[in-house]
Structures are given as C-alpha cells and as structure tokens.
Amino acid sequence: MPIETVIREVTSGVWTFSRPFTRMGIAAIGGRSTAIKLADGGVWVLASTILDDRTKQTIDALGPVKYIVGADAVHYLFLGEFHKAYPEAKVLTVEEVLPNAEKIGFRVDGYWNDAKPVQEFGFENDIQSCYFSGFINKDVAFFHKASRTLIQADLLFNTPCKEQYSMYGWPWRSGRTLFGLFGGFSPYSGFHKWITKNLGSKDPEAMKRDAKTVSEWDFERIIPCHGDVIEKDGKIAWQSAFTHWL
C-alpha cells in the first residue's frame, strides 16, 4: 500500500512529518522530520524523512526555509533533497556527515564537532543546541524555547511508534518488531536505559556533562525522530532514559 506522511501541528508553529521506517526489516522505529517557524518568520527544519509533495507544501506555507539540520552522523539521507529544494537555506550537521555529503552531492554550511562543540548559526534566539561528543552517533539535541520542546534524533526513542505507522499499518500487530520483545523501547524501559549506558556512550564524562545540560532546559515536550511524541512530562522521560548519567 502507498506510504503517506502524517502531518500535524503539534503546537503553534511546530509541525511534524511522521513516516514508517523499519530498521533492517525487524526494528520498527519510524521516522520524523520537524519544522519550526522562527520569530523572524524563517523556518528551521530537522530533516529526517523524504520531502514529499505534502511535506513541502506545508513547509512552504510556514515561510522561507533558513536552516536545514541533520541531527547526527546517520540522519543525513534526506539532506540532499531538502538542499535541492531550498538552496538558499544553511545546511547544518555534524562533522562525520561531511564525507557522505560529498558523495551524495550536497553542500554543508556548518557543523558541530568535538573541536568546537558549541556553535552559533543564527537560530539561537529561538533554539538552543547541545552537541553530544560522547554519544556514539554524535547527536545534537535542540530546545525550542517558545514551545518548551526538545527535538532530537537518536538520544531518546519512544516506541511503539503508533503515529508514524498510523497511515501504513502497525508492524507490531504482526509481530515484526524487535523492540516489542523487550517491552518496548520507551525512555522508561530498562532496555532503553541499558542501551543508553552500554552501547550509546563513548565518553562517560562527556555524556554526564551533556545529559545534564539538556536536563536543565525548561522543556515539557519531546519530539523524537523515532517513536511517538511525548506531549507532557518530557523532562521526567529524559531523566529516566539518562538516569545513569544524571
């Protein structure tokens, strides 16, 4: 059956674009892009899904796209098509993406890396960032201050991802979900905490520093790339997932 994007305004000026994505055919983790209308009228996009017609129409209606963001070392597959559609926007990601950007053929205007983890690209009045140098995928977490929303890619999952599969078919109904074997991959699950501690970390001290930075942000909501949006008590969810680092 055709795959469609679930598009909704989560809160004023914050839109999500949710689609199914099954890792290696067994882990139903979903995918999601997020677009935010900035105070100056421009648009900031975390681009993690395809830019289909409905997605583009929704983003275009928000305003001119000024920033296209790849949130970590593995969320770069769709940056090229966003860059092609919005050539005037700044493309921002992490340093590890640069070789793939060259192969695919899209421009990178700025990046976070271990040498300079704190960066300013022009959206900081609206959105703060925290680069996780100690995380395996070199993720960047983002905090949209006006809506009290944390946006991130692989630091925190919240499966099962019902919204992302709602227009396609829920794979856990047919038993095709690896995470279902572990009671789900939510920030409250022991499996998530174990993964974050044992497989996600490359530098414990850096993880403690950056997990604490995010924990001190004043957010209520979490928009993950993988799994359902956490609409309330987001900070509690974050502290649960990163309990070993706080």
Image (cartoon, rainbow, N blue to C red):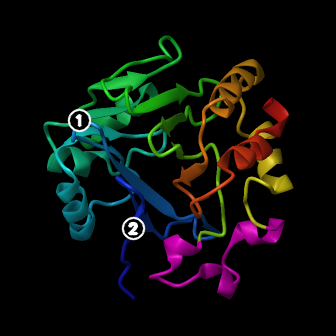
Residue placed most toward the observer, 156 or 138: 156
The reply, left or right, for residue 157 in relation to residue 21 is right
Helix, strand or loop at disc 2? strand
Picture residue at 27% right of the left edge, 60% below the top: 51
Where residue 86 sits: x, y (%)? 16, 45
For residue 8, the mark is: 2
* Mark 2 / mark 1, whichever is N-terminal: 2
Picture residue at 71% right of the left edge, 68% below the top: 178
- Residue located beneath label 1 in the image: 40
The amino acid marked with disc number 1 is Asp
Picture residue at 64% right of the left edge, 32% below the top: 135
Q: Is residue 167 magenta?
A: yes
Quarter that holds the N terminus: bottom left
The answer to whether mark 2 and mark 1 are in CB contact below 8 A is: no
The reply, left or right, for residue 51 in relation to residue 84 is right
Where residue 62 sits: x, y (%)? 22, 54
- What is the distance, in whole Å, between disc 2 and disc 1 at their CAs? 22 Å
Residue placed most toward the observer, 235 or 118: 235
Quarter occupied by residue 120? top left
Pointer 1 local density, CA inside 10 Å: few below 14, some 14–19, many at least 20 = few
Quarter that holds the C terminus: top right
